Each structure stands twice: as C-alpha cells, then as structure tokens.
Image (tube, rainbow, N blue to C red):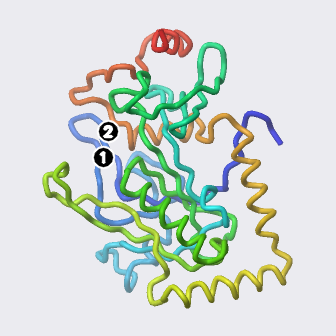
C-alpha cells in the first residue's frame, strides 16, 4: 500500500442539498430544499446530473422534489461510513492544512505533518474566523449496480453531522452491529431557528426505509447478513481493509477534491475581502504562510 496516501471508498457520484452559482461575478454557494444526485464530472454549468437523480423522483417527474433516497451503507462500523472531523483548508490550493477531532489533530507545518492537541475551532487561534469547521463525509450505496461504489454526501452543517452520527450509532446498536445490511433511506428535513430568522433550514437525516418498521428492518438485516456470510462475503474483512486505508494517509481529502469543497463550503468574505488567516495570493509560499500564521 502506498504510504502517505489515504485509500478511501471508491466514489461513483455525489449527493448534495445545494449548488454553487455565479452572482455579481463571484461563485457562491446556494442552499436548496431537495437532494441532487450528480456524477463526478463538472462543467461550466455545474455538476452533471446522475441518471438516478431523475429515476428516483416520484413517477420520474422532474418537478417532484427529491427529498428521500433509499440507501445502504458499506461498512458495519459507523465511523467508517461517516467521517467527521474539524477541517482547515487552504482557500487558495484546496489542500487540507489541519484536521482534528477536538482532542488531537494532524497539522501541516514548515517541519512537516505534526500531531498536536486540538481544542476545536472556538479554542484554536489558527482556526478563528470560520476557517476551521466541522466537516462530514457520508458514503452510501444506492441500488445494487456497484456494491463497492459509493455516493458521497459532504456537509459542514452541525445539524446534519450531529443527526447522522446519532442515527448510525443507534442503528448499529439496535441491529446487533449489522449496519451494512440494514435497509435505510436518506431524508431531508427542515427546521427554523432564531439564527435563521425563522426561515427554514434543511439538514439530512438517516432513517429506516419507508414502509418498514424497526423490527421488520432488523429482521431483513439479519436475513441478508446470513445470506452474505453463506456466500462467503467477509464483512469484517472489508471493514478492516477500509480502516487501514483511511489510516494510510495524513489527510483523507486531496487538494483536487479540496478545491471543490472550499468553493462550496468555505466561500470568500463579503466584498471579496480576505478573511483573516486565509491563504492569500502572490508569490508567498505555503511554508511562509504557515510560519507567519503559527507565529
């Protein structure tokens, strides 16, 4: 296995609840009230739609909003299906510079990758000003065409991350650890808060498949798990391989993927002003920027 390169689940598509639009000559993120399933191909008009984006709508009608998606997950371990951490990205290159869990972090410094304590965004001088955010990546399977090809949902939303973590932990416990065979669905939910000025905000939830009760879903998970074992499928081996793959690199997100993440979740400051601590243009090297920041 290549050292320094994280081996993550193969991605065949994306799931989002928003898009990036151009306003006043600037590309800015815009939230939506439905799911959009896309391929990994991006054109000047945005991400190309995946065929599932149309087929999963009621009656195949494009006017019907896509607010639930039948899914399964690839692994029994909840922490392998949802990767959640605090992320600080270089706004210019898209490279992750620091990734932590609120206790420990891996940070790119002038002396290489270092493991340091992580107080979280509110207590970290480097991550002030919205530069460091909770960042979650949920990998799910849609359909049976590719049982190892995942669709990825990325989010920096507290509501989505908190809800998905809880659901995966609970479903893992109640199914006796058979998370990979449990029939589930992604569901879009709305809520309003004082911070949203009573306007609805949307987040992603994970529930038992529509039309099934908890007991029925767990029974189906047990039946499918036994059938897969009889066929020789080693789910524990798959989980172990994924765990080793994630641990093989310092950062899971590449600069190539990070660029799209920065554009969607780390928009520039209003008026194009530089956010304090963000990467700036010019000939200054990344090492100089980090040294200046850390000093």
Q: Quadrant of residue 233?
A: bottom right
- x and y percent of residue 114 in the render? 64, 23
132 horizontally vs 250: left or right = left
Q: Earlier in the sequence, mark 1 or mark 2?
A: 1
- x and y percent of residue 12 in the render? 60, 60
Total tally of numbered discs in the picture = 2
Identify the residue shown where x is 49% and y is 81%: 209
Vertical relation: 90 (above or below) 280? below
280 horizontally vs 107: left or right = left
Q: Quadrant of residue 1?
A: top right
User: Which element carries disc 1, helix, strand or loop?
Assistant: strand
Q: Nearer the viewer, residue 215 or 212?
A: 215
Vertical relation: 197 (above or below) 280? below
Vertical relation: 71 (above or below) 111? below
Vertical relation: 125 (above or below) 205? above
Location of mark 2 (residue): 27
271 horizontally vs 181: left or right = left
Task: Check whether the beta carbons of the residues at disc 1 and disc 2 lie within 8 A of each other.
Answer: yes
Q: Nearer the viewer, residue 100 or 293?
A: 100
Identify the residue shown where x is 46% and y is 78%: 55
Location of mark 1 (residue): 21
- x and y percent of residue 271 in the render? 21, 27
Q: CA distance from mark 1 to mark 2?
A: 5 Å
Q: Quadrant of residue 262?
A: top left
């Amino acid at each position: 296995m290549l050292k320094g390169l994280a081996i993550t689940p193969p991605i065949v598509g994306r799931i989002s609840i928003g898009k990036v639009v151009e306003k006043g000559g600037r590309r800015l993120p815009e939230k939506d009230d439905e799911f959009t399933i896309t391929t990994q191909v991006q054109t000047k008009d945005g991400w190309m739609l995946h065929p599932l984006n149309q087929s999963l709508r009621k009656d195949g009608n494009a006017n019907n909003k896509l607010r639930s998606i039948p899914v399964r997950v690839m692994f029994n371990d909840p922490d392998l299906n949802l990767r959640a951490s605090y992320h600080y990205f270089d706004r210019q290159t898209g490279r992750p510079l620091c990734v932590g869990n609120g206790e420990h972090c891996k940070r790119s410094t002038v002396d290489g990758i270092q493991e340091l304590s992580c107080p979280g965004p509110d207590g970290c001088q480097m991550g002030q000003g919205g530069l460091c955010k909770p960042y979650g990546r949920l990998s799910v399977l849609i359909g049976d065409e590719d049982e190892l090809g995942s669709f990825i949902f990325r989010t920096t939303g507290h509501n989505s991350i908190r809800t998905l973590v809880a659901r995966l932990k609970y479903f893992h416990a109640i199914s006796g650890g058979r998370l990979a065979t449990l029939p589930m669905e992604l569901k879009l939910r709305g809520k309003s808060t004082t911070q949203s000025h009573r306007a609805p905000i949307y987040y992603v939830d994970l529930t038992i498949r529509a039309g099934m009760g908890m007991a029925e879903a767990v029974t189906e998970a047990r039946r499918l798990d036994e059938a897969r074992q009889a066929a020789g499928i080693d789910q524990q081996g798959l989980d172990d391989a994924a765990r080793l793959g994630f641990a093989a690199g310092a950062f899971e997100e590449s600069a190539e993927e990070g660029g799209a993440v920065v554009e969607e979740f780390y928009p520039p400051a209003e008026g194009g002003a530089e956010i304090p601590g963000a990467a700036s243009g010019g000939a200054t090297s990344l090492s100089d920027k980090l040294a200046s920041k850390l000093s």
